Image (cartoon, rainbow, N blue to C red):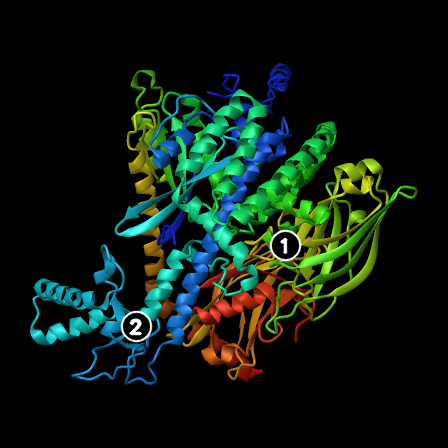
């Protein structure tokens, strides 16, 4: 077993002695077996950075996972669409009719039941008995329901031994367990999408008829179907590959290339596969030429980068924010950080490298690239005399929309990675209310040496400007090595969505640094649920993190105020005060009576205060959900709440320092 | 459309290096076994769709490297996992002792709702056994999780383990939806009274002011 333990029994809190340390240094095993397994690994400097082929293997796994994720998103999109169409097609107009099919209730007509979720009336044909459905239940065939009901009635009579009169009572009691088809479908969707686990509907892609992207999508789809039904042959190949990887690294690389080749050649749509595989080989050539630089990198640098990464990771773990991040994307972003040098990753990952190759070669591959996130045009100029890098951002096109009007307020953040210093971060101005912003801005990075060029890459992040934090609109990364041979390059780069599942505004490790200044007011975890029975919006204030300290003791005494505006009842709610706490856990629920139709015009005002005696309370931060001003994730949260009543939607939000009235 | 499925469950295998995580997964997904030891590079996953109570459940099973140097990347996958299998080697005392560290790792990194399960692998090597079945059971009881002794090599109870975990997750899911719908009712009353109280107190204060 590859257990590097020295075999000695060491108390986990005892520091190993010098001899042991020396031994472990020789074996490259870290501090001790105990600490190694305690989960403190992030504090332990990694003994050896990952080899190129290891990175490649991991990147491939991540990509495989991404494909699966994508198909899952499309599947959820279909479920959402199905549910929506079901709602749209509901025929019932009043209480005398079935909600779904519109049949009139009556002795001769449809039998009426009350849905236990939405409390509306439906006929037995358009609903399901949940008690009968406990066991193995197949699809919702309405005809199968009646016998089940009879069975349950018989069962009830036998057990309780009641007269026929009583039977009716119990049968209506049994009707308490009926669900209308819409609510049943909603429940089913909640299960199928994994929302039950992640506590809100995961990101989904609605099935669209966009001819522009059809091509790439269908390719992706076919790729994933292939993936779907076989772990088998592909896995076997992977297995084989790994065996070979063990025996010799050279052949492993070949095998991977071969693998990719096979992979694409297996695709339907020969055109695409051919283009792609040729692109891949170009990439691999590029890879070889740059391999030398990778090895020239000093270990020192690797460590500092890793440490920076792991520190911020730790922070994030501490606050436990991105609970719902899906595995794949989280790992991808993590991987970015954790990878000893991002440049190798650029070279290796086919997704990024195909983009790079299209940039520098402008081949006809471009149509295979997903431009759904939009493109950005810029030029880079390197001045060797002054060691400066001039970056001119001209414009972006077809960015994703963020607000209800289908527009965004984008700006770009530019950074040289790795070694993100404050001084290397620059931003453009914000261009308001557009998806095709013209920036025309020149940004200059100073103190960029030629060796830096070889090692570093430029990271461009497009974000939506908003006072509650800046929503992610895509990013791209390009290595600067090209500038060494060519002083100026003009680029049109498609933006990538590397954080497709970045649900909370909480940034991934790397972004944390970017947003430090903006998110100084902390975050709040809110649950929204429209309760159709009570006809009320139930707001749960779960917890806050990273609040500002306002008192002399370096802490605050926070509480949260809630108000719905406009609200005819003029109701205001307040949580209890959590004394001396910057990360208070409230877990309190409040209800606002309102109609679902009004919700779309109403906004929820959330304000966090620090309780003070003898003087006015200090303002800690605020947030408005809903209404017309909401964008990005806040809009999604509000709309989800309206669209899926009776389900609790949890989401993290940033607090703003603006005082809300 | 290729294979359709009803639910997607994400599972994760963790445990010390060499306990047989990859082999268990290989046995489950391919029904095969490989005697040569190949250390997993970072992470990997396999997919198998199973049938449970008439529902098709797609299992995406993440296999993690036990080696410490991959720890950063493997812990990143804890959070999205709905079920985690803790694997130890019954012929390796140390791997069993480390289970509690792995559990601690889960507590730190995984979602609180995650379903856990303890697997003692390599149970075909009875003559080399270092950890008795009772100790495994004891530990599982301690943490309130299920325990199964498996053998990837001899194909003993591997299927059972995955089916059990999937069934537990499914049960949890059903329970969650039901409790969500029933508790609002039970808790509803409570909340209603609470809410009635609150507005009145607020209103009374308001009238005084």
Instruction: Return the residue at label 2.
Output: A115
The mark found on residue A196 in the picture is none
Report how many numbered discs are placed on residues in the image.
2
Residue A3 rendering spot, x and y as whole percentages: 49, 21
Tell me where residue A317 sits by quadrant.
top right
Q: Give the residue displayed 55% in from the left and 36% down from the top.
A: A58
Residue B177 rendering spot, x and y as whole percentages: 35, 59
- Counting residues from the start of the chain, the first of labels 2 and 1 encountered is 2
Is B125 located above or below residue A617 in the figure? above
User: Circle 2: is it few (<14), some (14-19), or many (20+) Cα within 10 Å?
Assistant: many
Q: Is residue B137 left or right of residue A40?
A: left
Tell me where residue A437 sits by quadrant.
bottom right
Q: Is residue A584 left or right of residue B148?
A: right
Furthest-right residue in this view: A385
Q: Secondary structure at mark 2?
A: loop
Q: How far is disc 2 from disc 1 in space, using C-alphas?
A: 42 Å
Tell me where residue A523 sits by quadrant.
bottom right
| Of labels 2 and 1, the one closer to you | 2
Q: Secondary structure at mark 1?
A: loop
Residue B110 rendering spot, x and y as whole percentages: 48, 44
Is A13 located above or below residue A635 in the figure? above
Instruction: Return the residue at label 1.
Output: A546
| CB within 8 Å, label 2 to label 1 | no
For the C terminus of chain A, give its image quadrant.
bottom right
């Amino acid at each position: 077993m590859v257990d590097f333990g020295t075999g000695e029994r060491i108390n986990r809190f005892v520091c190993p002695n010098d001899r042991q340390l020396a031994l472990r240094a020789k074996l490259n095993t870290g501090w001790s077996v105990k600490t190694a397994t305690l989960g403190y690994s992030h504090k332990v400097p990694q003994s050896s950075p990952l080899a190129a082929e290891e990175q490649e293997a991991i990147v491939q796994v991540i990509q495989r996972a991404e494909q699966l994720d994508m198909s899952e998103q499309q599947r959820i999109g279909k479920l959402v669409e199905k549910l929506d169409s079901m709602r749209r097609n509901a025929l019932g107009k009043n209480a005398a009719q079935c909600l779904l099919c519109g049949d009139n209730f009556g002795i001769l007509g449809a039998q009426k039941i009350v849905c236990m979720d939405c409390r509306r009336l439906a006929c037995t044909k358009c609903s399901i008995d949940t008690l009968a459905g406990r066991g193995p239940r197949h699809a919702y065939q309405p005809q199968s329901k009646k016998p089940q009901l009879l069975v349950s009635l018989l069962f009830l009579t036998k057990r309780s031994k009641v007269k026929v009169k009583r039977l009716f009572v119990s049968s209506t009691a049994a009707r308490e367990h009926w669900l209308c088809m819409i609510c049943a479908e909603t429940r089913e969707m909640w299960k199928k999408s994994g929302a039950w686990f992640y506590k809100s509907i995961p990101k989904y892609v609605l099935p669209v008829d966009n001819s522009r992207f059809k091509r790439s999508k269908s390719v992706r789809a076919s790729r994933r179907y292939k993936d779907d039904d076989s772990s088998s042959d592909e896995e076997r190949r992977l297995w084989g590959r790994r065996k070979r990887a063990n025996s010799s690294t050279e052949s492993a690389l070949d095998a991977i290339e071969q693998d990719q080749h096979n992979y694409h050649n297996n695709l339907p749509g020969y055109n695409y596969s051919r283009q792609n595989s040729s692109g891949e080989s170009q990439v691999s050539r590029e890879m070889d030429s740059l391999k030398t630089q990778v090895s020239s990198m000093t270990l020192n640098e690797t460590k500092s980068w890793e440490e920076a990464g792991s520190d911020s990771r730790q922070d994030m773990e501490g606050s436990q924010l991105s609970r719902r991040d899906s595995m794949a994307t989280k790992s991808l972003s993590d991987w970015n950080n954790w990878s000893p040098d991002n440049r190798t990753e650029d070279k290796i990952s086919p997704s990024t490298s195909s983009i790079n190759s299209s940039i520098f070669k402008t081949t006809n591959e471009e149509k295979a690239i997903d431009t759904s996130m939009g493109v950005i045009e810029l030029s880079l100029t390197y001045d060797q005399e002054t060691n400066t890098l001039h970056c001119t951002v001209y414009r972006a096109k077809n960015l994703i929309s963020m607000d209800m009007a289908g527009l965004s307020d984008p700006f770009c953040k530019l950074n040289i990675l790795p070694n993100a210093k404050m001084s290397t971060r620059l931003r453009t101005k914000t261009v308001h209310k557009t998806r095709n912003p013209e920036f025309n801005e020149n940004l200059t990075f100073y103190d960029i040496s030629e060796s830096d060029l070889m090692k570093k890459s430029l990271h461009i992040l497009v974000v939506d400007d908003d006072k509650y934090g800046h929503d992610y609109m895509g990013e791209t990364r390009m290595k600067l090595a090209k500038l060494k041979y060519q002083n100026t390059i003009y680029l049109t780069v498609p933006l990538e969505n590397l954080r497709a599942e970045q649900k909370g505004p909480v940034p991934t490790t790397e972004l944390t640094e970017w947003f430090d200044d903006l998110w100084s007011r902390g975050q709040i975890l809110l649950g929204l649920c429209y309760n159709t029975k009570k006809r009320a919006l139930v707001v749960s204030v779960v917890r806050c993190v990273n609040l500002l300290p306002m008192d002399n003791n370096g802490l605050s005494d926070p509480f949260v105020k809630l108000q719905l505006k406009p609200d005819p009842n003029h109701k205001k709610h307040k949580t209890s005060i959590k004394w001396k706490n910057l990360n208070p856990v409230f877990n309190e629920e409040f209800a606002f009576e309102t109609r679902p139709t009004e919700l779309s015009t109403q906004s929820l005002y959330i304000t966090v205060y620090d309780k003070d005696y003898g003087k006015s309370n200090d303002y800690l931060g605020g947030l408005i959900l809903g209404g017309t001003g909401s964008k990005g994730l806040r809009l999604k949260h509000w709309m989800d709440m309206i669209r899926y009543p009776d389900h609790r939607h949890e989401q993290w939000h940033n607090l703003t320092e603006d005082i809300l009235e | 459309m290729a294979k359709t499925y009803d639910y997607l469950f994400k599972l994760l295998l963790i445990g010390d290096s060499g306990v047989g995580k990859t082999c268990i997964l290989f046995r489950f997904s391919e029904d095969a076994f490989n005697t040569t030891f190949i250390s997993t590079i970072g992470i990997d996953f396999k997919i198998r769709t199973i049938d449970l109570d008439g529902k098709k459940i797609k299992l995406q099973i993440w296999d993690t490297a036990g080696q410490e140097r991959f720890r950063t990347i493997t812990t990143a996958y804890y959070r999205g996992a709905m079920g985690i299998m803790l694997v130890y080697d019954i012929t390796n005392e140390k791997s069993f002792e480390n289970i509690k560290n792995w559990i601690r790792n889960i507590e730190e990194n995984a979602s609180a709702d995650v379903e856990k399960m303890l697997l003692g692998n390599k149970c075909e090597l009875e003559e080399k056994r270092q950890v008795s079945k009772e100790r495994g059971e004891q530990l599982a009881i301690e943490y309130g999780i299920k325990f199964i002794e498996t053998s990837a090599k001899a194909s003993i109870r591997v299927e059972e383990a995955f089916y059990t975990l999937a069934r537990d997750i499914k049960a949890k899911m059903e329970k969650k939806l039901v409790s969500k719908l029933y508790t609002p009712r039970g808790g509803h009353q409570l909340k209603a009274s609470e809410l009635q109280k609150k507005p009145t107190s607020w209103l009374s204060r308001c009238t005084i002011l």
